[in-house]
Amino acid sequence: MLALQKRQQEIEEEVAKASERIQSILLPSPELVAGERVFSQHRYDNGTIYIGEWKQEKRDGRGKQIWTSGDIYEGEWKDDKQHGLGKNIWAAGSEYLGYYNKDEKSGIGIYTWEDGSSYTGEWLKNCMNGVGRHKWANGREYLGSWKDGMREGFGCLFNRNGSKYEGEFYQNKVHGVGVLQEQDGKVVRGLWREGKFIKPLD
C-alpha cells in the first residue's frame, strides 16, 4: 500500500504542475515565434472553430477548438490531433486536464464529472489505467490499481460509513484476498469472489 500511496503522491504533484502550466498553454510557442508555424482561425463546414497554430496545413502546436455543442479543448496539438498537455471542457459539465496521445487521454490527468466525482491518476487510450484515486461525490474513495477503466489489482476502498477494504480487486469488484475493517473496528481477513465474501482466512 505504501508503494501505491507514494506513486499517487507523485501523480498528484505532476497534475498540479500541469494545472499551473495550462494557464499559459495558449501563449505563442517557440516554434511560432521562430516562424516554423503560423497562427490563424479556421471554421469547419460543421461549424467547429479552431484558433491557433498550424504547420503544413494541420493543427500543430498550441490552439483552441470550439465545437457547436459548446465543448471546448485548449492545449497542444500534433499532426491535426490533440497531443500533449490540454484541457477539455464539455458542455454537459465534465472536465479533463492532463495529457493526450493522438486524441486519446494517455499519461496522467484529472477527470471531474458533472456531479463533482473525480479521478486523478494514470490513463491509457481514454481509460483509467495504472494507479489512480477515484473520489465519489458521496464521500466514497478508492485508491489503487486500474485496468481498462475498472478497479483491478491491489487497492483500498474507503466507504462512507467508515469501513474500508484493502486487498485485491477484479473488474470493479472485491475479488481475492483482502482485509475488511468494519466501522466498529472489527477486522476480517478473508477471501472474496466477485464482490461476495467466501470465507475467513487465518
Image (cartoon, rainbow, N blue to C red):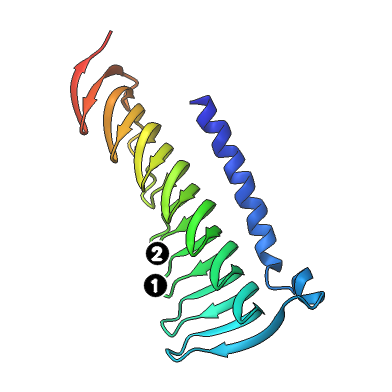
- Distance, label 2 to label 1, CA atoms, is 7 Å
Residue at the spot 70% in from the left edge and 83% down from the top edge: 39
Which circle marks residue 92 in the picture? Answer: 1
The reply to whether callout 2 and callout 1 are in contact (CB within 8 Å) is: yes
- Name the quadrant containing residue 144: top left
Q: Is residue 181 left or right of residue 65?
A: left
**Image position, residue 153 (x, y; %):** 37, 32
**Image: 36 above or below 13:** below
- Name the quadrant containing residue 93: bottom left
**Image position, residue 4 (x, y; %):** 51, 31
Judging by the rendered image, the residue that carries numbered circle 2 is 114
In the rendered view of the protein, which quadrant contains the C terminus? Answer: top left
**Image position, residue 20 (x, y; %):** 68, 58
Tag 1: amino acid? Ala
Q: Which structural element holds mark 2?
A: loop
Residue at the spot 49% in from the left edge and 70% down from the top edge: 89
Q: Which structural element holds mark 1?
A: loop
**Image: 4 above or below 120:** above
